[in-house]
Amino acid sequence: MGKPLLVVSSVTYAMKGRDLLFRRGIRGYVERIPQTEESGCGYGIYVPAGADEAERILQENRIRVLRRMEQEDGP
Amino acid sequence: MIYLDNSATTYPKPLVVREQMQKALRELGANPGRSGYDMSVRTSQAVYNCRERAAALLGAPGPECVVFQPSCTQALNLVIKGYLKPGDHVVVSDMEHNAVMRPLQALEAKGVTYTKAVVAPGDNDATVDAFRKAMGPRTRLVVCTAGSNVFGVRLPVERIAALCHQYDAKICVDAAQTAGVVPISVTEGGIDFLCCAGHKGLYGPMGTGLLVLRDPGVSLATLTEGGTGTQSQSLLQPDDPPERYESGTLNVPGIIGLYAGMGFVSAMGMERIYREEMGKVSYLYEKLSRMGHVKLYTPPPAIPYFVPVLSFNIENRPSEETGQILAKSGIAVRCGLHCAPCAHEKMGTKGTVRVSPSAFTRPQEMEALARRVRAIANTVQKR
C-alpha cells in the first residue's frame, strides 16, 4: 500500500489542513501532487497514519478533500 | 524632513520590515504555491504565515479568508465589480474616496445605482439613521469608509453592518485609514468584506493590500483570471479563495514586509497606536484652533469618533500653496482633494491641508508644524 495523499484545492488549504490535523494529534505534510493527468497541478496533505480520520476531520472543518491519491514511495 | 503624510503611506517603515524584505529577496526567491522543492515550500509557508497573522489581527475566520491584493483600491474594485449585478442598488457614505466612487460610477452605465448617506460627524445615531433611510429593496451592498481619509471622521461600521444584515445586504468596509490603527474584527463586527491598504497603518511596503472575507463561501466574480498553481487542467478559474482572486505571481517581498509590519503593530498594540496618534492630532487641533486665519472643519477629534487625520486651511491661501511653503520648511503634508471630492463637497472645501501622524511621529514634530502654520497664518493680515 502506498502513502496516502489527501488532495485539497490549494496550498493555502493544504497548510491550514496540516495545522488543523496537527492540533488533533495527526501528523501531516504538505506535498505537491505527483500526478497531474486528472486535474493538473496541486497540493495535498500526506498523512502517514490515520488518513481516514484525517479526511473526516478536514471535511468537518470545511476543507474539501478533492480526492485521495496513493503514492508508491514514502517521503 | 518632518513626515506627516502617513495617510498616503506610512514612512519610515519599521526596521524589521526593511530587514525582512531583504531577507525575503535573499532567501525566499522561489514562486510560492507552484512547486514542491524546498525554497518554494518555504516561500509558500511564509506567505501562509502572513495570511494567518492578518486573519488574527483583523478577526477573520481563517487564513483562507485573507486575499492579497496590490492595493486597497484593487480590493475595493474586486468587491464592487465582483459582487454587483445590473439592477443592484448600493449605499455609500458621502465621504468616500474615489477608490469607491469611480468603480461605482463605472458600474452606473451597467445599471447599478447608488445613494449617498449623509454622515453626521460625532453623531453615530444620526449616521446610522441616514444609512437606514438610504436603504431600499434593491440594496445589495453598502460600501463605506471606516474613517475619512480627509477629515478623520470615523463611521460606526459595526452598527451599519448590523443594519445591512437586517436588509439582507452585505457591507464592504474601506479600512484604508483604519487598519492597524483602530481595532476591527471581521467576524465579530459582521464585516462581509474588509479592504485594507498594506502600506499605511499596517506598515508594510507599497504594492500590498488585503481583502478579508467574513465568509469564504461567498463568491465574487473575478477581475483577473490566470495561473494559480492548482487545478490547472481546468480552464475555469478555481472557486476557492484566496487563490481564486490571486492569479499570477504574488508580491512575496511585499507580503513578507507586510507580515513584519503587522508584527510591529501587534507588538506596539493597536489601541496604544490609536491613542497616541489621536493625542498628536488633538494637540495640533488645539493649537490651530487658537490661531487666527486658520480654518478647521470638524469638531475636536476625539476617541472614538475620529481617526488621526486632520484637515485645515489658512485663509485666502489655496491648500497647495500652504503645502508648498511647508515643504520648503521640510514638512511633508498632503494638499488638494485627496482623491475624495465627495468629502470635500460635503464640507464645502476645494482642497485642504491634511496632516496625518504615524507611530513614529514625535510630539516635537507636531509642535514644529504648529509653529510654522502660525507663521504662515500671521502673513495673512500683511498680504
Image (spheres, coloured by chain):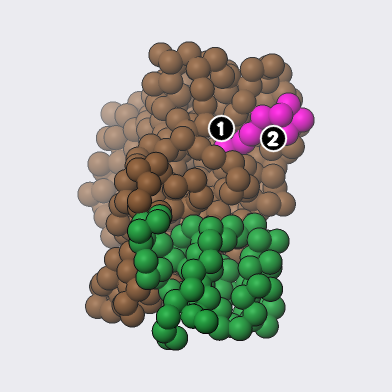
B161 vs A42: above or below: above
Q: Residue furthest bottom?
A: A74
Asked if both marks, 1 and 2, belong to the same chain, the answer given is yes
Q: Which mark is residue B143?
A: 1
B250 vs B16: above or below: above
| Quadrant in which the C terminus of chain B appears | top left
Disc 2 crowd, CA 10 A, few/some/many (<14, 14-19, 20+): many
The secondary structure type at the circle numbered 2 is helix
Residue B210 screen position, x and y as percent: 46, 51
Give the labeled residue for mark 2: B160
In the rendered image, is residue A74 in sight? yes
Q: Residue at x 63, y 21 (%)?
A: B139
Q: Which residues are magenta?
A: B163-172
Q: Is residue B38 left or right of residue B163?
A: left
The subunit letter for the residue under badge 1 reads B
Residue B108 screen position, x and y as percent: 44, 16
Which chain comes out brown in the rendered image?
B
The subunit letter for the residue under badge 2 reads B
State yes or no: discs 1 and 2 in contact (Cβ < 8 Å). no
Residue B15 screen position, x and y as percent: 36, 74
